[in-house]
Image (cartoon, grey):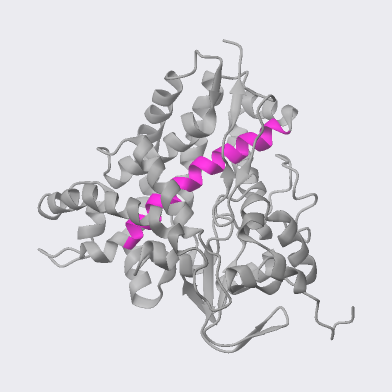
Amino acid sequence: MTTTEKPDLSWLDDVTMTQLERNPYKVYERLRAEAPLAYVPVLGSYVASTAEVCREVATSPDFEGVITPAGGRTFGHPAIIGVNGDIHADLRSMVEPALQPVEVDRWIDDLVRPIARRYLEQFENDGRAELVSQFCEPVSVRALGDLLGLQSVDSDKLREWFAKLNRSFTNAAMTEDGEFANPEGFREGDEAKAEIRAIVDPLIDKWIVEPDDSAISHWLHDGMPPGQTRDREYIYPTIYVYLLGAMQEPGHGMASTLVGLFSRPEQMEEVVDDPTLIPRAISEGMRWTSPIWSATARISTKDVTVAGVDIPAGTPVMLSYGSANHDTGLYDAPSTYDLHRPPLPHLAFGAGSHACAGIYFANHVMRIALEELFEAIPNLERDTGEGVDFWGWGFRGPTSLHVTWEV
């Protein structure tokens, strides 16, 4: 094919959401090779699939953050991941202070380590466990739930909320007319939001008159004139964002890291013997299976050409960070987990002004949880009688991880 010829992308007409949710790698491998920026009909959007194009769009002054249609339907406005300008600056100033490294270092160990120990004590003498539901997800949601001020909400309910919001957010299939192909797919998300409001509204009523050190209380008060708080309708979309992405990411990141280590037993042994390798193991796990796979987007603010494709002003582009992290232009054998891979930067936490605000927090939740897990059960083995299935196009992680050990 000469440089003037356009690739034949008619095969994209046959791509389905089921394909993308079960195994997006084949589709994105072909996109990276044939069209790093291409229109994917089932998503009703252009998609960037290589590291170079994802980073270019994410950091370009010609693009602004925008929420996907399914994300907008799920979260409402103004969600922090889909706004720009003064509103985005205000929301970032609202959430970022508690997530700064100097602040996180002050309390992260005291927050996460007792949570991890509490869940480990429930099964460490059993000789077997399903780590996604018994450890990875519960530690993740409990740590963030307590940070937000939701100690009264049990971990199973928090997990249920993020699962329902996840299915709503990733209900992304579109018709040729630009309508949602499955409107009923948002019902669970609506149910979760109604439950969240019923529980959080009374807490907000209390925090307005009796502020405390919880994150949501700070969101209400910080940066506001004396006697004023931010309106709850203004912060609820960002609360929903946190109850999905910020709760999902550390749990699925550590689960994917474990699956990767189990695929390389000699590397698992290295990490168990030397816990200082855990951050490196997590970084590779996040690259290998990015928890936030294709959940972010940008919109062009002017006519622009990217990767040889003319993009009119007002065109949304989805950024597939999971695909970018498998870019063979950067990584040798990217589908293989390798603790000793040269430490190149990855895009699991995004890029540009809309990069994840909780990078430091999430990495330390995963680190502490895995430190406690390997300390308590150093002889952990994957139960090979059970398979490991990954699911998700927008957010991705193992649905279960069965393990055994000698007690």
- Where does residue 362 sit, x and y in percent of width and height? 47, 46
Q: Is residue 260 magenta?
A: yes
Q: Is residue 105 visible?
A: no
Query: Which quadrant, please, contains the C terminus?
Result: top right
Image position of 56 with respect to 98: above or below: below
**Residue at horizontal 67 percent and vertical 37 percent from the top:** 260
Q: How many marks?
A: 0
Q: Name the chief secondary structure element in magenta.
A: helix
Image position of 139 with respect to 121: above or below: below
In the picture, measured across the screen, residue 273 lies left or right of residue 104, that is right
- Where does residue 288 sit, x and y in percent of width and height? 67, 47
- Where does residue 215 sit, x and y in percent of width and height? 28, 50
Query: Which quadrant, please, contains the N terminus?
Result: bottom right
Q: Is residue 6 visible?
A: yes
Q: Which residues are magenta?
A: 237-263
**Residue at horizontal 76 percent and vertical 54 percent from the top:** 331
Figure quadrant of residue 400: top right
- Where does residue 316 sit, x and y in percent of width and height? 54, 76
In the picture, measured across the screen, residue 261 lies left or right of residue 354, that is right
In the picture, measured across the screen, residue 83 lies left or right of residue 253, that is left
In the picture, measured across the screen, residue 393 lies left or right of residue 76, that is right
**Residue at horizontal 40 percent and vertical 66 percent from the top:** 73
Figure quadrant of residue 349: bottom right
Residue 203 vs residue 56, the one in the foreground: 203
Q: Is residue 198 magenta?
A: no
Image position of 92 with respect to 335: above or below: below
Residue 247 vs residue 171, the one in the foreground: 171
